[in-house]
Image: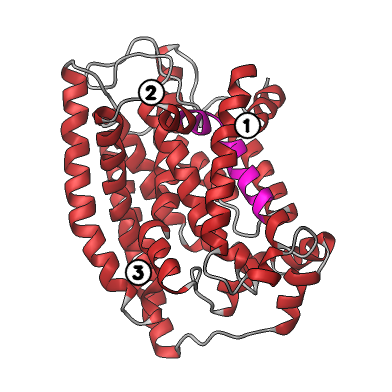
Amino acid sequence: MDTTTATAPAPAEPAAAKRLPLLDVLRGVAILGTLGTNIWLFTSAHGEAGPLLGFEINDGGPVGSAFQLLANGKFLSMLTVLFGVGLAIQYRSAEKRGRRWPGRYHWRALFLFAEGTVHFVLLFAWDVLMGYAVTAITVAWLLKRSERAQRAAMWTALGLHLALVGLITAGAAAGGIEPRPEPEVQALYATGTWSEQVQFRLDNAIAFRIEPVITFPLLVFLFLLGVRLFRSGAFAMGADGAGERGRRIRARLMAWGLGLGLPLNTAALFAPAECFYLERYVIAPVVMLGYIGLVGFLVEHVRRGPVTASLESLGRTALSGYILQNLLASVACYGWGLGLAARYGSEPWLAPALWLGIGALLLAGSWLWLRRFANGPAESLQKAVLR
């Protein structure tokens, strides 16, 4: 998730800089937005097992619907695109320095897979790092191919994804979706021990890992989309020609993403439950493009202050922030921690309050951490092991 750029960019790409500030802000926004979706899993009666039992991710009345409209699937898609951007930056850096590609990048991806495996087993069943690692290896290989081959792979992946979501939606409509309350699962998250939850994830590993499998074509598409956006200069800022080009691209992203995506997403909220898959895996990525444009607009037009600086810090420590937010939510909600989900899970204020509290801790903590250290804890571990 490095945003370091090469020192001699191609004419159509962003100007050289130690970091691209917009990318850091976007990563910080993506981490907070992902928490905005996942927090409803932690506060639900069935915990992270809720989706396997047919329960919606957000089930908190009007407040939950608002979070679903604004967050569900959007920031996960944004995080995926930004992983693709990071991959493109590393490829360009290797190319400029004459290094073999993918070279050592495979080791980085394998380490990310190992981190994701540990995160999945010990902490959070819906980990995304394992899927990102496999996708990164695939896309890293594609970057060695021609632009034409990359475009073909990108649009083929999108076509496969749309066909698969269509089949899943049709199957769900034919069979219906009926939530299955299971008292033993509720008890596991309300009063169970940490080791019992670990064993539950291992026992149901195939079911919990199904999302990155069925969305693999979408991951490939979004990774390659991130590569194309970076190469087109979509994240460049400034008063020069590159900055103006980036501004025009982001304006189009905002117009199309919000103008088309938000009305579709609003309509999906009132559609049958079977349309959940269309909302999360088809409409949400469209809205995400609008969010990228909107964040870029705000970064350019709002004076830089503590919020922007904190978002940049969180973006620079995104891997650490992603892991820490799930750790804090687990401690707050589950029975082996504070047990807030069992005590207050039916209260509509719990999930928003936790999101605000954990989000504030992530922002302040990352800013304070980077005042003393160059990288986040997880990022430092990764660098040390790979070195």
Observer able to see residue 101: yes
Q: Which residue is mark 3?
A: 278
Q: Nearer the viewer, residue 311 or 106?
A: 311
At a point 33% along the width and 62% down the height, the residue shown is 282
Q: Is residue 334 left or right of residue 220?
A: right
Q: Nearer the viewer, residue 2 or 97?
A: 2
At a point 49% along the width and 73% down the height, the residue shown is 59
Decide whether residue 318 is among the magenta residues. Answer: yes
Q: Position of residue 296 (x, y in %)?
A: 28, 34
Q: Position of residue 99 (x, y in %)?
A: 49, 16
In three-dimensional space, the C-alpha distance between marks 1 and 3, rounded to whole angstroms, equals 35 Å
Asked which quadrant contains residue 268, the reply is bottom left
Q: Position of residue 53 (x, y in %)?
A: 59, 79
Observer able to see residue 106: no
Between tags 1 and 2, which lies in front? 2
Report the disc number at residue 107.
1
Q: Which residues are magenta?
A: 312-329
